Amino acid sequence: MLSIFTPADFALRKISPADLGSLPENAVWIDLVKPTADEDHAVERLAGIAVPTREDMQEIEISSRLYVENGARYMTATLMCAADTDNPRTTAVTFILANHRLVTVRYDEPKPFSLVENKLARSCAPGITGEMVLMELLDAVIDRNADILERAGGDMDTISHHIFEPEGAARTGHAKRYSDILIAIGRKGDLTSKVRESLVSIGRVVTFVAAAVDGVKWSKDMREQLKTMQRDVASLTDHASYLSNKITFVLDAMLGVVNLEQNNIIKLFSVMAVVLMPPTLIASIYGMNFKVMPELEWVHGYPMALVMMLLAAVLPYVLFKWKKWL
């Protein structure tokens, strides 16, 4: 799908061209979503660039993600998608700056794109250029990652509370409860790692943009915005690392709680086995088929055996409680 944005009355107007042979020359932002070969060729003719393929965008080496070709700056970043669901994913997005026009190539729907599109459709700065649109997109991506980390941090606080301060019946432990907590920890760990990957790639893009503007007259506000983005990315990356360490700690704590619960169960079985061992011994003695066994002829022999078995069970239990083994 091809979307073209042109300035009109202090806003960006979205156009979906019917004729790929006559794209508007005043377009400042061209957005390619799962483009066809014809759409690629039409944009290449208009912008004078080579649109990278999906395979090119998947390359991980820096030289294939950040480079200058024929005066155009190519920047590929990893963005978050579906972060609000149980199956978050990342996608590669390429930003191309050429002749003050921005071309974006993507194969998914990162939320910052719709946010920026709606924002610029309401209002934008006069004389908006592709560089300004790029700044808006990068700023929205950074804000989105910050929101994801903030929500993940809050979720981890809730999980920690469930582990260290369980309420009611949860204190005794339950297999399904433990399983749910472990699944939640795993999902937050996966989400945090993906956000950190996105932040690292965005940081590289911001640094590349800042370094590639030498000789180009950027406004003071845009230079300050670039510096702010670099600081934000650095702080968010540190926060993502902190959150990853916290997730590791919570996971270790959860596994410790599970081991402790298992040890308590095994201890209970061990104590029961020890408590029942003396009565079993007494019952076994009186179950032997010896001809001479005086208690078998005694009227009170059966009650005596029952009392002995009861005492043999109670005494070990009392001893364990006194030793504080239970």
Image (spheres, rainbow, N blue to C red):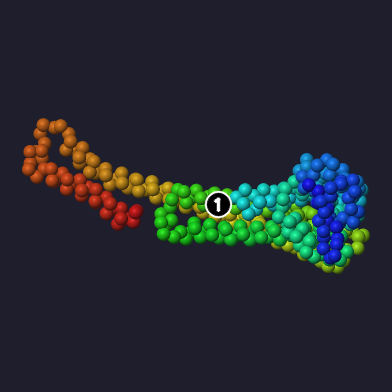
Instruction: Name the residue rendered at 78%, 54% in the picture.
Output: 204
Direction from residue 60 to residue 264 in the image, left or right: left
> Which of these two is toward me, 132 or 258?
132
Name the quadrant containing residue 283.
top left
Q: Amino acid at mark 1?
A: Ala
- Which residue lies most toward the front here? 18
> Which of these two is toward me, 100 or 285?
100
Image quadrant in which the C terminus is located = bottom left
Instruction: Name the residue rendered at 86%, 60% in the picture.
Output: 7
Residue 209 rendering spot, x and y as whole percentages: 83, 56
- Which residue lies most toward the bottom here? 220
Direction from residue 202 to residue 321 in the image, left or right: left
Which residue matches tag 1? Answer: 184
Whether residue 60 is visible, yes or no, is: no
Name the quadrant containing residue 324.
bottom left
Residue 50 rendering spot, x and y as whole percentages: 87, 45
Decide: few, some or many residues near mark 1? Use Cα within 10 Å; few <14, some 14-19, many ≥20.
some
In terms of secondary structure, where does tag 1 sit? helix
Residue 218 rendering spot, x and y as whole percentages: 88, 63
Whether residue 298 is visible, yes or no, is: yes
Residue 23 rendering spot, x and y as whole percentages: 88, 50
